[in-house]
Amino acid sequence: MVSQLTDAYARKFYYLRLSVTDVCNFRCTYCLPDGYKPNGVTSKSFLSVDEIRRVTRAFATLGTEKVRLTGGEPSLRRDFTDIIAGIRENAAIRQIAVTTNGYRLARDVQQWRDAGLTAINVSVDSLDPRQFHAITGQDKFRQVMEGIDAAFEAGFDKVKVNTVLMRDVNHHQLDTFLAWIKPRPIQLRFIELMETGEGSDLFRRHHISGDSIREQLLARGWIHQIRSRSDGPAQVFCHPDYAGQIGLIMPYEKDFCASCNRLRVSSVGNLHLCLFGDGGVSLRDLLAGDSQQEALQARIASALAHKKQTHFLHQGNTGITQNLSYIGG
């Protein structure tokens, strides 16, 4: 019988978000507006394929069913396909997902699928190429759209698209997004802009509650779907006239943390109990060899005793998260 990770508030954890790099080649206004700065971190600092294999094996033994690979931009790692294949060795892990800016999707998505990737999230904050360029700092809208098409051609039956909801930037573009997903099996997920240590000014200018979108959807006959135990935090809505779906991720809503089912491991091997927590628990010293698996599992399980009931974003406390590339957003 698998020992299921459970915290002091009876929340069970089926979902691991694993950052494999904090490097990103985009300069999104809400994340890395001045571009990536290494701050002494090199590619040699990031978890190796063997270390990733060991840490995901430990989580699988502790009941994890889903691993999402994040960054930075995870596809910038030359061994990204090997990372997927290494995680795939854990039969208990049913889903291996990636969140990507889509930059290399058209080129590589088939080999990712062949290696064992089961789900894709692509970040697209605007369907206007000029606005996309302004938000991301990259004139890559066409390549990202081609990448989404390539994902379907590679055999994925659904693609999730992440859109950071920003007042006076894209909050008024719901009709444009709905028209895009009407014939396509895309789950478009509006994510409320979150405050980070480096993004307080932008947050104050552009934050808007996802409730404004939810009210419009319900008024138009969209139906709220039931969430499964290894799903992310999105409230998902469907409509009989649409092939696509809409998801809302609303971290400022009351009781958002009550259904938390995910833990995070950073690209340098620290376990983070919350995206906006105060610190991490180092796992790196237990990832050097296969003989330390039991000790690794014990450290992960014992850390859960310190997971807080909620984040403190409402008080403006963003913890150690200076930007969303730090531990994978």
Image (cartoon, rainbow, N blue to C red):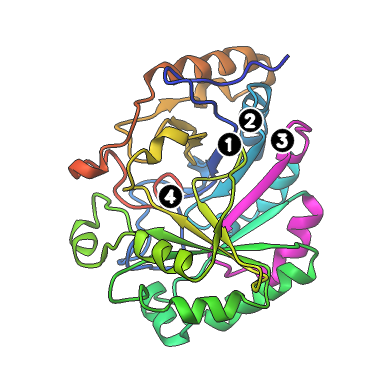
Residue 293 placement: quadrant: top right
Q: Dot 2 lies on which element? A: loop
Q: Nearer the viewer, residue 37 or 12?
A: 12
User: Is the residue 11 above or below the residue 247 in the image?
Assistant: above
Q: Dot 3 lies on which element? A: loop
Residue at numbered disc 2? 64
Residue 311 in the figure: left or right of residue 190: left
Q: Indicate which disc, 2 or 4, sits on the residue closer to the N terminus.
A: 2
Question: Where does the N terminus fall, quadrant-wise?
Answer: top right
Residue 91 lies in the magenta stretch: yes
> Looking at the rendered structure, which numbered label has been put on residue 15?
1
Residue 64 placement: quadrant: top right
Tell me, yes or no, whether the two marked residues, 2 and 4, touch with CB atoms within 8 Å.
no
Per the model, the C-alpha gap separating discs 3 and 1 is 9 Å
Q: Residue at (60%, 58%) from the top-left corner?
A: 75
Tell me, yes or no, whether the two marked residues, 2 and 1, touch with CB atoms within 8 Å.
yes
